[in-house]
Image (tube, helix red, strand yellow):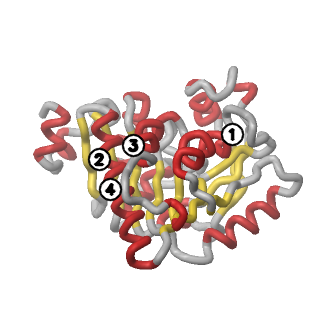
Amino acid sequence: MSMLLRIFSDKVSLARTAAEQAATAIRRAIAERGRARILVATGASQFEFLDVLTKCSGIDWAKVEAFHLDEYIGLPATHPGSFRNYLQERLIRKTGITRFHFIAGDAADPSAVIRDVGTQLASAPIDVAFVGIGENGHIAFNDPPADFTTEDPYIIVNLDEPCRRQQAGEGWFADISQVPKQAISITPLQILKAREIVAVVPDQRKAQAVKACLEGEISPMVPASILRRHPNTTIYLDRDSASLLSPALKSTLTEESQAALGS
């Protein structure tokens, strides 16, 4: 694998180090190009990471242009489960960032939203993408089998039952019946166009997906496995999310990561 795998004893130390890498990438892009273009993930797994990132010093957030990975179709921005609401609370209000391209999933014409946001996204390279891995192995809202061929920046996707169960389980919805069945999602190939990818994947509930993504075939049936095709990806795990990795893979890790696993 060309990607770098880093494992920490807990999600707090994971978040601290991942945020330092993310902040460095943002500062570097601003220094070299006058702005930084970023992709931002959401979900409970990103809480600690975003909390640390928003407190990092030396980032001129006025020079940051941001996009998010996905949004539910039909869900208003005021809903607790909306990713626009999430990002307002956990990133935008804390940093004062002004150039954020929101995905209006509740717009009357989702295809127009896809066209407009996609045009903005594809207008220049993304400097750093922050992503997670779903319990079913999804990346963004690309559930298995994911589309590994489309060059479109964003597409409309159907959300499978495991994905919808995860959203209810994280507390964003009262039960699975309340979780929308469709979303607008960035595509896997579009994520791979970022100059750098930082994947933050803590928690035991992600362990099976992590194992499949890192040790199985690169396959649309395990969407996040496509990260292994990117030459500048760092995947951050904690002891829990890395708990099912094979001894063979563990033997290739740095001493730091082996120590975090207690191996």
* Residue 205 can be seen, yes or no: yes
Q: At label 3, which amino acid type do we have?
A: Val
Q: At label 1, which amino acid type do we have?
A: Ser
Q: At label 2, which amino acid type do we have?
A: Thr
Task: Report which residue position mark 3 lands on.
Answer: 52
CB of mark 3 within 8 Å of CB of mark 4? Answer: no
Q: Quadrant of the N terminus?
A: bottom left
Whichever of callouts 4 and 1 sits on the residue coming sooner in the sequence is 4
Disc ID at residue 82: 1
Disc ID at residue 17: 2
**Please, is residue 95 above or below residue 172 in the view?**
below
Whichever of callouts 3 and 2 sits on the residue coming sooner in the sequence is 2
Residue 120 pos. (x, y %): 66, 71
Measure how far apart labels 1 and 2 are at the Cα level: 27 Å
CB of mark 2 within 8 Å of CB of mark 4? Answer: yes
> Tag 4, which secondary structure?
helix
Q: Is 87 placed left or right of 207 in the picture?
A: right
Task: Report which residue position mark 4 lands on.
Answer: 21
Q: Name the residue rendered at 18%, 39% in the picture.
A: 247
CB of mark 3 within 8 Å of CB of mark 1? Answer: no
